[in-house]
Image (cartoon, helix red, strand yellow):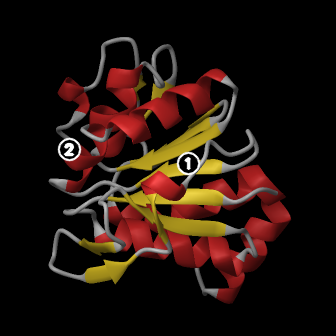
Amino acid sequence: MQESYIFLANGFEEVEALATVDVLRRAEMNVKTVSINPVAEVTGAHGVKVTADTVINNVELPETDSWLICPGGMPGATNLAACGKLSEMLRNHNAAGGKIAAICASPALVLSPLGIIDGRKATCYPGMESLATTEAEMTGERVVRDGNVITGNGPASTFAFALAIVEASKGAEAAGAVAQGMLYKY
């Protein structure tokens, strides 16, 4: 498996971003945090400062078996959506059949405007559905996988969201082993 990326913008939801990174690394997946800022430091929605592994200008479009992951949070999701380079990467990765995951506000604010969830089942933070295109079927479920796209609805669903990425990448047995090691009922 190639390197995957989780994109961080000022105002990102800390639980969704950092717990996802933790779960993927427990599964021995190669994932890097990426600041969309010109510098590696990013401040979360609740004031947690994080130093990302790299900045977006150092990231090339990965192989299709890599994940591009967008956490939510406000104004984090809005800031991700405003990043032209990230939008281009997501659009091109999706067109190539690459794997994409987004949680909380990001399915509605980041993926929907790019057409990535058009014609798909998806979920997002409750109340954000009206901001998504009508071409997506917003289910209200905690986590939804439809083809190459996984979406989650919010912070409390982060473990289920991250484990769905592990399962899609390495199988149910690997996801189950990570869940068991974390004492999470999967």
Mark identifier at residue 68: 1
Q: Quadrant of the C terminus?
A: bottom right
In x, y percent, where is residue 125?
Answer: 27, 46
Q: Which residue is drawn at 60% across and 87% down?
A: 183
In x, y percent, where is residue 113?
Answer: 32, 23
115 with respect to 120 (left or right): left
Mark 2 or mark 1: whose residue is earlier in sequence = 1
Q: Is residue 40 visible?
A: yes
In x, y percent, where is residue 68?
Answer: 55, 48
Mark identifier at residue 86: none
Q: Can residue 185 be seen in this view?
A: no
Find numbered disc 2 in the image and state the secondary structure of the residue it sits on.
Answer: helix
144 with respect to 49 (left or right): right
Q: Using the image, determine if residue 84 lies above or below residue 156.
A: above
147 with respect to 138 (left or right): right
- Disc 1 marks which amino acid? Leu
Tag 2 residue: 78
**Residue placed most toward the observer, 123 or 76:** 76
**Residue placed most toward the observer, 140 or 164:** 164
Q: Using the image, determine if residue 118 lies above or below residue 29.
A: above
Quadrant for residue 167, please give it. bottom right
Instruction: Specify few, some or many for label 2: CA neighbours under 10 Å numbering under 14, 14-19, or 20 or more.
Output: many
Q: Which residue is drawn at 30% across and 41% down?
A: 83
In x, y percent, where is residue 122?
Answer: 45, 32
Q: Which residue is drawn at 77% across and 56% down?
A: 2
Mark 2 to mark 1: distance in Å? 17 Å
- Disc 2 marks which amino acid? Thr
Count the labels in the image: 2
